[in-house]
Image (cartoon, rainbow, N blue to C red):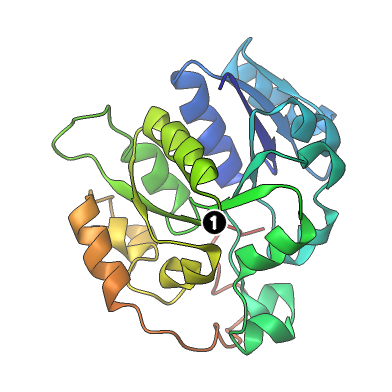
Amino acid sequence: MTTLGLIGSGNIGATLARLAIAAGLDVVLSNSRGPETLTDLVAELGPRARAATADAAAAAGDIVVVTVPLRNYQQVPVAPLAGKVVIDTNNYYPDRDGTFPELADGSVTSSELLQKHLPTSKVVKAFNNIYFVHLAALARPAGTVDRSALPIAGNDTGAKAAAAQLIDALGYDTVDVGPLSESWRFQPDTPAYAEAYAGKPPFWENGPEPADGTKIRTLLAAARRRTPLTARKPGAWPAPGFPGAA
């Protein structure tokens, strides 16, 4: 893999772009406002990065990351992602995204919704459970003692292997949680979500703390399925820079 496509270039997308450039990959960025709004970020990233439309970023990427608010998932282009591995960072926040009945009753996960929207793509859930500041700070070379692990989920074994290879290049080990139906284990309000990588709560005000595969597996096993987040006070959640935050 040589090119990472990004549909969405906010805090999470930009952080992934920086990690990808550091790993020697090419990056094609996009957002909902147009390539011209990404000039400064592209200049910062250097000659291996360029901005494009979402369709062009989807077409260019060997692997493509979708990192947009969940309410906009149906705007993700379908045709240029056919046959590709698509990494989904999205989370469901009802007070921001509105009510999705199938998510509200827990019958599907948000990544299963994206997979349904992209029937010929291979969706892998990843990067949704870590604050962008921690994502940048905790990246480590393979074999480092304090290397952290990120959970992944997906229905296609080969796609998960490709995603794990990318994540390894970006500085993280992975823990395979199983199919997309199990991705609820690291969605908001579960033990493996966000606070796993923070020194102590409130996690957005404290420094990062490594979380290895053993810790993440323990937290995943402790998860208990319940209905998604209830409405919160405006502005309280998600904080800017959390996966899927606007």
Residue 146: horizontal and vertical position, in percent?
Answer: 17, 40
- Residue nearer the viewer, 75 or 10: 75
- Judge whether residue 83 can be spotted in this image: yes
Tell me which residue sits at (27%, 45%) in the image. 148
- Look at mark 1 in the image and give the residue it sits on: 243
225 sits to left or right of 110: left
Where, by quadrant of the figure, is residue 107 drawn? bottom right
- Residue nearer the viewer, 99 or 179: 179
Q: Secondary structure at mark 1?
A: loop
**Is 182 rendered above or below residue 50?**
below
Looking at the rendered image, the quarter that the C terminus falls into is bottom right
Tell me which residue sits at (82%, 60%) in the image. 74
Looking at the rendered image, the quarter that the N terminus falls into is top right
User: Residue pushed farthest left?
Assistant: 145
Tell me which residue sits at (34%, 39%) in the image. 172
Q: Amino acid at mark 1?
A: Pro
Residue 207: horizontal and vertical position, in percent?
Answer: 28, 51
- Residue nearer the viewer, 183 or 203: 183
69 sits to left or right of 241: right
User: Residue pushed farthest front?
Assistant: 157
